[in-house]
Image (cartoon, rainbow, N blue to C red):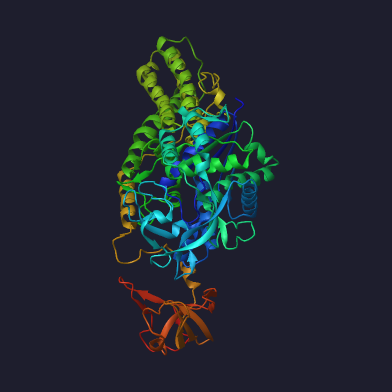
Amino acid sequence: MSNNKFTVTAALPYANGPLHLGHVAGVYLPADIFVRFLRMKQEDVLFVCGSDEHGAAITLRAKKEETTPQAIVDKYHSINSKAFEDFNISFDIYSRTSKPIHHETAQEYFKTLNKKGSFIQKTTEQYFDEEYQQFLADRYITGTCPKCGHEEAYGDQCENCGSALSPTDLENPVSKLSGKTPILRETSHWFLPMNQHEDWLKDWIKEGKFEGNQLHNPKDWRNQVVGQCMSWIDGGLQPRAMTRDLDWGVKVPLEGADGKVLYVWLDAPIGYISATKEWAAENGKTWKDYWTGDRKLVHFIGKDNIVFHAIIFPILLKEHGGFVLPDNVPAYEFLNLEGDKFSTSRNWAVWLHEFIADHPDKVEELKYTLTAIAPESKDSEFTWKEFQTRVNNELADILGNFVNRAVVLTHKYFEGKVPERGELTAKDKDVLAQLKEFPQKIDQLIMQYKLRAAQAEAVNLARLGNKYLAETEPWKLAKTDMERVKTIMNIALQITANLSLAFKPFLPQKSAKIAHFLNLGELNWDKAGLDNLLDAGHAINKAEILISKVDDTFVEKEVEKLEASKVDTNSNYMPQKETINFEDFTKLDVRVAEILEAEKVKGADKLLKLTLNTGLDKRTVVSGIAEHYSAEEVIGKKVSVLMNLAPRKIRGVESQGMILMAEGPDGQLSFVSPERDLEIGGEVR
């Protein structure tokens, strides 16, 4: 046991959609492996994560699904937190940025920085949607990237080339609210003058030095992390707004800041701190112990978050004072899927919660494959065929085969008891010497964040065991030299016991199963490499199937499912929405109503104010149909209206329902009206 202390964070996933395998392979699984290994070494470690529940992505999803941001974050926080639990990701805490403790922490942090003069307040021109009468956050704007020409870049980043952008950098900007070109209008915000921090950032990132102290070894940082950061710095850092004009998020806690919230990339990283506060309060700890002193702070992230964790958040930590800076930011490249990029819009993804529901017995097989192909230094690809190959040829044929033979032969020849070791041959001594070397190799690789290679070394240990049994052939010697068989099987069982330790960070459930076969108690990493983990005479349990092979039918079904679910983005029609239960549908109260009166809503080109006779009452509904119908021509029409939609004010008019419309590929809207002359108030079901 060493005296190292770690606070490990995994990037807070946006609670605006479910997790897919790309997210898991590049952030949460490697972070979990690293943390599990630290715990085996009995290090002091805290593993922090939670849902990022603010920002434009949430509000956009809410508008798309015609619901509230709170409903969106509640839905996806529930889905994702359960998926993490079922995937056995061992967070110490999985929190949410919508919690009061986070809002309080983020606001206090902002006020501290503001008092210190860390921000500059200035008025700039920002894009404004005239139709919706609101300023547009970065993610509400798309356009052509000026650097690579990608036509769907966001206002803060191009996800095609990875360049950080400002909305005004975009060519042909379009509002995601109205679909129209926004105008520029003046607004005031608080900016972080990142240009004032270039010198110390260079020393810290390239040399690992901060204020004269050596904080980390720069050789331990991945090339792509250092490269991307230095590209930003060498290009000249610019002031970046730390507030936004939005109605969803952490309110700016200053006078004169009505209608403004904290920028999500100020808000979200502070979520690591607020989650630590929450965990510490629940466990009788002092939260500052995990963010100050000689603590090693490690951020596991995807490459699209490098700048935020290796430049912006460190500036915020330094400006506040008293916090440690990151010891490492092991960022992962992107994982592709069956020859294409993961795409939520095209539904080209393997969703984690769906995989677990369909294949609960294949969870660790998936973990193994994702680690074996992890995009540590370059993009990699997941295919179902490779999943099959990895499981069958490596897990089953190497690990499973060796463990099974060692346990079964012990029961066959020695009634399930560990035989006593006799005189060692040169081969025995060589195998035991190699066994002793494995812990150091795995330890070194994991602490260098080379988890693919570390897992491969665990497999190599199983290979060593297989090779040893194949060369010594105890099943043949049992006819002539049982004393020699005793030594062979003792060594084979010691290797098996070590395999339960070697695989514990990667496959904790398989590791526990191996330990169960051996009737082995809990062991820490300091026991790894020892050749006396099992005493002679120790009784072991019988073997069960450790790894089941994956057949061709499994692969065919998964590929077919993926292809069938893919959305054609070239289609003129919107893709199918998420599946709902029949019970959800029955909650909708849709009825036939007659339009009695209609008039245009002042100042809104698209909106008509309609007075309806629903058979139950007369009510007002605001509908965006003015571009398709005049007020005069809709009077007397029978329409379908959703009755039990929560009322909401639209341009000062309370709308008490929603008219159902059909939309053609050209965007033309048409009423959904009954074919026959039904009575007013008739239910649509």
Vertical arrangement, residue 486 with respect to residue 280, above or below: above
Residue 454 location, quadrant = top left
Q: Position of residue 38 (x, y in %)?
A: 55, 31
Where's residue 413, x and y in %? Answer: 45, 22
Q: Which quadrant of the figure contains the N terminus? A: top right
Q: Residue furthest right?
A: 284
Which residue occupies the foreground of this view, 180 or 398? 180
- Work out whether residue 448 can be spotted: no
Is residue 576 shown left or right of residue 508?
left
Q: Quadrant of residue 383?
A: top left
For the point 40% across and 26% down, which residue is it?
460
Residue 454 visible in the snapshot: yes
Q: Is 592 drawn above or below residue 554 in the view shown?
A: below
How many numbered tags mark residues here? 0
Q: Position of residue 127 (x, y in %)?
A: 45, 61
Nearer to the camera, 86 or 264: 264
Q: Residue at x 36, y 75 (%)?
A: 662
Quadrant location, the C terminus? bottom left
Image vertical order of residue 198 relative to residue 343, above or below: above
Seen from the viewer's position, the closer of residues 256 and 76 is 256
Instruction: Name the foreground residue: 355 vs 379.
Output: 379
Residue 401 position in % (x across, y down): 39, 30
